[in-house]
Image: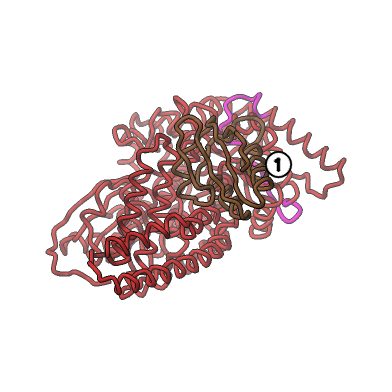
Chain colours: A brown, B red
Amino acid sequence: MQERTVTISNRLGLHARAAARLVRRASQFNSNVTLLRKDTGETADGKSILSVLLLAASLGTSLIIKTEGDDEERAVNALVELVEQKFGEELSDGVF
Amino acid sequence: MASSSVIRSRDVKLQGVPASPGVAAGRVLRLDERGRHQFYYIGVSAAQARMEVRRLREALQEARAQLQEIKVRLAEELGYEHSFILDAHLLMLEDKRLIEELNHEITTRRVNAEWAVRSVADRIISAYNKVNDLYLRERTSDLEDVATRLLTILSGHDKFDLSKLDQDVIIVANNIWPSTVAELDFKHVLGFATNTGGLTSHSAIIARSLGIPAVVGLHEVTRLAKTGNVIVIDGAEGCVILRPTKPVLTAYLGKRKREAGGRTRPAADAAQAAETTDGVRITLRANVELPTEIESLALFGAEGIGLYRSEFLFLNRLPELPGEDEQYEVYRKLALATGDAGANIRVFDLGGDKLALGGFEAEQNPALGLRGMRLSLKVEHVFRTQLRAILRANLHGHLRVVLPLISTITELREAKRIIADVKQEMAEARVEHNAELPIGVMIEVPAAAMMGDVFAREADFLSVGTNDLIQYMLAVDRANENVAHLYQPLHPAILRTIADLVRVAEAEQVPLELCGEMAADPLQAIALIGLGIRTLSLVPGSIPLVKNAIRSVELERVRALLKEAMKLTSSTEVEELLASELPRQAPRFFAAWSSRA
């Protein structure tokens, strides 16, 4: 099992579009993907958009990404990268 | 769609926010928030439950197919960037957890598929409603949209195809959803009446751009109106009358007839010039926000685009931004469609309410906050991307740039410096572009109006944005029902300001245009030309009507009338003078107009 901690840093958090991106990315791998909110302990299936949305992970939330399966390392790396890139939706100046 | 004539006529008048002008009368098509159709609880046997599971699976398939199709259509009509919202919807339909829960609901509780969809959706929605994050909480409307689609498919017998309406209808809904807008057959939609929404809501924007009357913010119209009921919408007054009595209906039909060929349908003579009886030519240009509107410009007789609100490109896809190439495609389309008449592109005017709409942190006082040009200067790279796209597209036509919400000359100078810099960069990088790009200033802040002469010396043209100018001058938010009555376009202060701007523009020999809803009201439009305005930009749907008004007046007499009006002390007096004098001067148009219900 792989496990990495990330902080949600895009302004709107895991809203519909970011969640859709995450779910699409997670679904590309065989491994099971679980997200765990560090503050509340709530977990979500990373391949279910409803589950991910229910986490309501807004800006600043710490999440543990857990992957388990034959491609668990690639999966965790891909998801961490997506979160760190703020789901590709942010610009540097902080207004948008 | 069964018509229910059994309900007795009795005028039920509801007041809302006027969102798109014009009168429409017709039968209600109510789109319920809780699904477009009735659905019932049915207990089923174990064998039947397996059938229900299969029905559900087929409905899910059908829903996905429909959404894929809508996505293509939405991308074609509004641009690819607007179709993203459906991506989340598609994922919901593929969601393992949702499907498992639905199957579980059917097999263990032994209920019909419809009931399972409704109860599972309700459960998830109530879970979302507990989430302490406004933006995420709003996603319940996406889930509701998806659930509604499934319920519609499951209800089978009444497959209601919004894209194939067989009769004219007036849409009554809590709100108009993006996917509904993409599906509607607008040939048969006479108007909108919605519970929620303000002037900048999606439904209001769509209605205005399509030239169909709309009233929003009616609170309980969906509760009171039933599909098949007769309803009258007065988009100018912002009211609707439900199940009107005969005399009331007749009065409104008369009013509509007088407006016919005006607001809602392009007149046969739309292509004729707007020339007063004494031969003064007025230019009528179009205010545009959606790419789809561009095609209808010729139909309405618009001479180019006086205001392209580029923020619509941005608004529907926040927090992502449209790239240079994507913007270039839209601006090139504008350039090609408007030819010599050209198009004024207003730099994205996000901020205030629109930023809030995009889910951004609300400012304490957004109308006075970081918006318009202030925002563009703050996010200079976004401004630069937009400029590059415009400069490239300008190879194909005559584009101009308008800078919104300028309050100091420094902002204009700063913007001009950036524009010059972008041009130089492009020249050095040998990026093909047309640097002949006039820069205009929107006069919509009292300070800019007072300093009109200064701006006229440094800008290539001035564009008076009356909607905001009136709001800022009179300190009135016209969407606030407590003070909306104080929003008075014919306030003497406004007339004086406009007259003064005409004077300084003439003195500095700088073109002056005016855009805003004032230009779309025949009486006010005539007042504006009487003050000396020669170029008006307005919603395309109102152009034929205003053209007819202009063609019925003699400018010299109108000028004299406005001179009298300028001596008056209140908006009411001005209105009374114009309403009594114009029909005398131009009975061909105004006698009918002023006797409106």
Return the residue nearer the eye: B121 or B262. B121
Give the SS element for disc 1.
helix
In the figure, B126 relative to B329: above or below? Answer: above
Looking at the rendering, in which quadrant would you find the C terminus of chain B? bottom left
Q: Is residue B412 left or right of residue B56?
A: right
Q: Position of residue B333 (x, y in %)?
A: 66, 58
Start-end of magenta stretch: B393-412
Residue B522 appears anywhere in the view: no
The residue at which mark 1 appears reads as B385
Q: Position of residue B316 (x, y in %)?
A: 53, 48
Residue B559 appears anywhere in the view: yes
Q: Position of residue B407 (x, y in %)?
A: 57, 26
Return the residue nearer the eye: B76 or B524. B76
Identified by mark 1, the residue type is Thr
In the figure, B372 relative to B142: above or below? Answer: above
Residue at (59%, 31%) from the top-left corner? A95
Q: Chain of mark 1?
A: B
Q: Examine the structure image and report whether residue B220 is included in the region drawn in magenta.
A: no
Residue at (35%, 71%) from the top-left corner? B160
In the figure, B362 relative to B559: above or below? Answer: above
Looking at the rendering, in which quadrant would you find the N terminus of chain B? bottom left
**Residue A10: quadrant of the picture:** top right
In the figure, B451 relative to B169: above or below? Answer: above
